[in-house]
Image (spheres, rainbow, N blue to C red):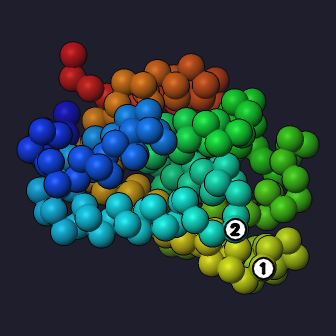
Amino acid sequence: MPHIQPLARDQLSQFEPIFQAVEASMGFVPTSFFAMAHWPELLQHFMALAGTVLNSGEVDPGLKQMVAYVSSNAAGCRYCQAHTSHNAVKRGVSAEKMARAFEFDQCDLFSDAEKAALRVALHGGTVPNGVEAEHMNALQQHYTDQNIVEIVAVISLFGFLNRWNDTMATSLEPSAQNFASETLGSAGWQVGKHGFDT
């Protein structure tokens, strides 16, 4: 059960065009947006930042979602794991790859470039931050400075979201919960505090 009751979508008509764009991309509007809407300026600026980080730049959108997924796992946020795994598959990452994402270092499904990015995501998502010079040096062998900025921006964005959603106990949308249960259940994913009340 969420700690703050989200506002209803029909109370937020000023955001409807953005909600429609998010819904077209994700298949739903994240519940977290409706809680953030208690402070409209936060929601407005957060959506602009998230849109820039996730939907522009040079890094493949599927890789960005895998980075978000691995960093969210390191932080323990089940809500964000469900979203990012679902979004990664929608952006062309195989469900098998997502189910094996936590073993990326030992799995042939991942390229050396992906492994370098996911290693930074794993260590960047921990507290205290575990990224070392060797992790960044490996990243620099595969990515430009802009690419690295994009990857770190994804980790940072999800650092905010991981803390937001776990602190607020944001209820996970049924479609994201069903996807994660079916796709990630074998990897140990469980809904935890983010389940809807029945």
- Considering the image in quadrants, where does the C terminus appear? top left
Camera-side residue: 158 or 169? 158
Residue 173 has which mark? Answer: none
Amino acid marked by disc 1: Thr
Task: Give left or right: position of 6 versus 100.
Answer: left
1 vs 2, front mark: 2
- Residue 51, quarter of the rendered image: bottom left
Q: Name the residue that disc number 2 marks.
A: 58
- Residue plotted at (40% across, 46% down): 22
Amino acid marked by disc 2: Glu
- Residue plotted at (33% across, 65% down): 46
Q: Are marks 1 and 2 in contact (CB under 8 Å)?
A: yes
Residue 134 vertical placement versus 101 (above, below):
below
Q: Is residue 123 visible?
A: no
Q: Secondary structure at mark 2?
A: loop
- Give coordinates of residue 142: x percent, y percent: 85, 71
Q: Name the residue that disc number 1 marks.
A: 144
Task: Give left or right: position of 65 versus 139.
Answer: left
- Considering the image in quadrants, where does the N terminus appear? top left
Give the residue furthest to the top.
Answer: 198
CA gap, disc 1 to disc 2? 10 Å
- Give coordinates of residue 92: x percent, y percent: 71, 39
Residue 15 vertical placement versus 108 (above, below):
below
